[in-house]
Amino acid sequence: MSARKPKQRRTRTRKVAAGKKPGAASARQRDPLAGRNHAVAKGTRIGDQFEALLALQTRLRAPGGCPWDRRQTHETLQTYLLEEAYEVLEAIDKADPRELSEELGDLLLQVIFHAELAREAGRFDISSVIQSIHDKLVRRHPHVFGDVKADTPEQVVQNWERLKGEERQGSSKAAAKEQIVPSVLDGIPRTLPALLEALQLTRRAARVGFDWQNVEGIFEKLDEEVAELRTALREGGASRHEEELGDLLFVIVNLARHLKIDPEVALTHANWKFKSRFQAMETAARSEGQRLGDMSQEELETLWEAAKTRSRATTSQGTS
């Protein structure tokens, strides 16, 4: 069984639920959910649907359940959590509501799975997760549930960040005892993709005034970093090459932030564009009985320009 997609485990789930798996009778003695029909009828209340999904995941983890599910830990599920999150993003970009609904379900399963693992270990359960986010949303929206005034999205963000800072400071007893002032950069996960981490770091710094006044200042810095990279390539070693290239990428993230563009999304779209155009080159070469690897640089450039032209024409037709 593939561990890649929960969708591939559903068939096995139905078999267990229907009591078709060998040893199901003994499993029912250990697990009162075993042998029940876990299908949820359309029109069922959301609360009932959610409880049925929780019961289903509990059944998969129970003795006599799914061997793959029973083997998983928080650590082994990390890859799947990331993959499902990115598949949600891809479904959004495709503007496909059916696919988005399915991928959101896969992502929800990851939340439920982690909560079930924590419940089994006696740490917390899904109720704690729901209560925590409910209380946080009420706390972070005093302009809705309190007397704070916030008429614009920018004011809401400012209030949100201020409240986050107060919460971090209030929860850090050790910091209070040692009189350590929390950093405005605290709380940014190091596990974020590097582009997103850079975006979060520069956003936080900008909120306390550490920022360029306008985009032209960033372009000047970009030119400076390009020059420094060129110098490093002539004079420095590999570690300096990496450092200067990192500085250049960091400035580009700042440029994206000033332009109100998510750099991760922008790069993802650029990746897809390159992939589409390169595959168009492969198709064009095959139609002439050739392979890209056997063609000259000039021929490859000709195919690339033709692919770019076709891509832009298709994009123009789609937006006209």
Image: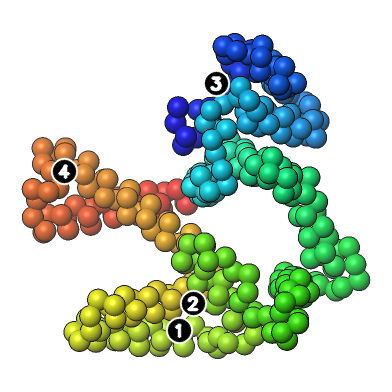
Which residue was labeled with disc 2?
254
> In the visual, does 285 lie left or right of 220?
left
* Residue type of the residue flagged with mark 1: Ile
Q: Earlier in the sequence, mark 2 or mark 3?
A: 3
Distance (Cα) linking label 1 and label 2:
7 Å
Q: Which residue is mark 1?
A: 218
Ranked by sequence position, the earlier of labels 1 and 2 is: 1
**Separation of marks 4 and 3 at Cα, in angstroms:** 42 Å
Residue pointed to by mark 4? 285
Q: Earlier in the sequence, mark 4 or mark 3?
A: 3
| Residue identifier under label 3 | 11
Asked if residue 151 lies left or right of residue 300, the reply is: right
- Residues at badges 2 and 4 in contact (C-beta under 8 Å)? no
Q: Residue at x 78, y 60 (%)?
A: 136
Q: Relative to residue 180, is residue 98 drawn left or right?
A: left
- The reply to whether discs 1 and 2 touch (Cβ–Cβ < 8 Å) is yes
Which amino acid type is marked by label 3? Thr
